[in-house]
Amino acid sequence: MTFLAGRGIADITGEIAEIGLLGYGLPDQQAEGLHTRLRARAFAFAHGGRRLLLVVCDLPLVFSSVTQAVVARLPAAYTEANVVITATHTHCGPGGYSHHAVYNGNTGGFRPQTFRAIVDGILEAARRAIADLEPATLRLNHGELQDASANRALRAFERNPDADKVHFPKAVDPATTLLTIERDAEPVGVVNFFAVHGTSMTNRNRLISSDNKGYAAYHWERRVAGIDYLGESDDPGLIAAFAQTNAGDLSPNLNLRPGSGPTEDEFENTRVIGMRQYEAAARLLAARDEAEVLEDGLDCRLIHLDLASVRVGAAFTGDGLTHHTSHAVPGATAFAGALPDGPTGWRFVGAERNLVLDVVSQQAIYRVSRRLRDAQAPKTLAGPVSLLNRVVPFGQEVLPIQLVRIGSLYLLCLPFEVTIVAGLRLRRTVAGVMGTDLDHVLVVGYANAYGHYLTTPEEYDAQMYEGASTLFGRWQLPAIQQTASMLATAMRDGRRVDPGTPAPDLSARRRHHPARPGPDEPHSHREIGQQLSFVWDGRIATAEFVGVHPGNDPRRGGTYFEVQKREGLYWRRVADDADWSTRLYWNRLPSERGTTRSTVRIQWHVPLETPPGRYRFVYRGNTGLARFQGKSQEFDVTDES
């Protein structure tokens, strides 16, 4: 029986100004414009009456708020069990789309406009993929990529036993895996799996960016395959998604300093690390005739696990004893951030110790609660999530653990940032039950919800950032291994699994929303949309306009501006705000109380291959009452430019 497969893509960008960027946790990292749009790339599969939907999103994280809203509006054949929504983990996407307060700390609260853009965009991509289902051949290929990541937690990694570390001689997971969808022997969709953080863009950046994985997808789709994201064709062309695996301790900053490696420029670092992922995936595609053809259909299992109270059997703990997880508690080091990728604004005394909290934890709390000590020691405790949840939904403790099968490929989809050795142990667990090779099992992190990090017990003991962010304690990984084993056994034996009680849907709860921007005000003697200045130096064209607040209209599925080339009597769009070569900067100016007065600066870093000719910018906006457009002065690109 032949697989059916379909693909779809849609814009999920949301707000681009005066909204906190999610990832680094800096209160002052507020969006001031757009570098690259964010997209959802969906892949639908059907075989023997079973369905599966995989959506890879250019997002910092996926929350239950998003998954629940999407699944509720999908066709009945798609449920929480056979829908996977995963994030690329860019750290420069907008926040404010979670129903848990901890993730909305720098956004002024919940942001309905961004939430709608994300949910509507995922649904649009998913529906396109489902409508696109046609007979297809699925191929699986494996390779290695060694120069696109570095281990940012070496001290913790080194605590693992040699039997684990021998799999990672350079302390990175170099595995790059490509799932290809073919029709009539031509690729129409690819999903690449590779582990590296989306932190090439630093916490100094203020532009919305899809980071290195977003660049890899953009390059393949736009630069290589020639996709026009604003085109009207029913055939989307080649859709290329770059998904995460166990990236918890892997940084793209090869020199282990924020924005450093392979160059000292964050934009160039983003491009280079993305390009290396693309090139590795493209090599696998070129060798697809040697790839494995997937057969044997689809399957899925899911359980909602209350991580606050898992009894972990001796078969998984490693010390021959039974242990328990506990309620979620971050460690003090978690508030410092992962220093090689950028510290947060929550700096304690020193990067890894807080003496006051350390004394309170070790000499008071752990002495009173033996069970908490067994679960969480040696963590320096800093803020119990369960107590905060009594006041306001703060963090999630019931989390989905999901195992899906596409032919001989098994995806263990987890709501965690999984370190490479933790991922190795989980893959061994599933592969052992299913009787398959290790490279046929992948851990897909950042999937369906978010529960922070997942480290090995040995890494946990180091209490670096990743261990301190393993919220449910030292036995969290063994608890997930135990659950993965149960799901795999049920799948192998053809048994159903009781999914348990999911985390509550919090969408109906009242929550704080920031005020909408006030009415837009023109500049003195200048109308909205009018050009204020223009500079063309032969390499970069920059035009500044009297602007409006981008929050009036996020232009999902559209563009804030175009770069146009004169062709005879007409102007043709050659670039827009989705292109790597363009940037939009928004700036608020002093204004009358309750109004918005702003400028928009558009830059085009002219690509070397740009043909000579006459060009201009067209800026489009919405005052909230009416749409408008402004045009820049024209400029010439020559062979010498």
Image: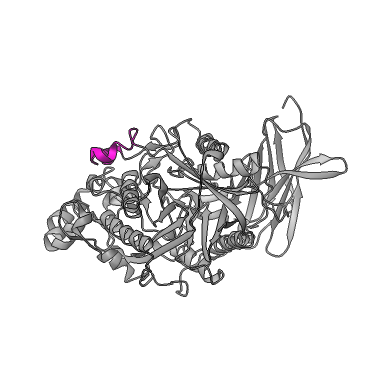
Magenta part of the chain: 154-171
Q: Image quadrant of residue 127?
A: bottom right
Image spot of residue 626 (x, y percent): 73, 63
Q: Residue at x 56, y 39 (%)?
A: 289
Q: Is residue 591 visible?
A: no
Q: Nearer the viewer, residue 549 or 324?
A: 324
Q: Image quadrant of residue 47?
A: bottom right
In the picture shown, does residue 299 fall above or below 276?
Answer: below
Q: Please indicate whether residue 283 sits to the left or right of residue 553 in the image.
A: left
Q: Nearer the viewer, residue 606 or 122?
A: 122
Q: Please indicate whether residue 533 sits to the left or right of residue 390 in the image.
A: right
Q: Nearer the viewer, residue 566 or 21?
A: 566
Q: Is residue 641 visible?
A: yes
- In what quadrant of the picture does the N terminus appear? bottom right
Q: Please indicate whether residue 491 sits to the left or right of residue 33 in the image.
A: left
Q: Is residue 410 magenta?
A: no
Image spot of residue 591 (x, y percent): 61, 56
Q: How many marks?
A: 0
Image spot of residue 324 (x, y percent): 21, 61
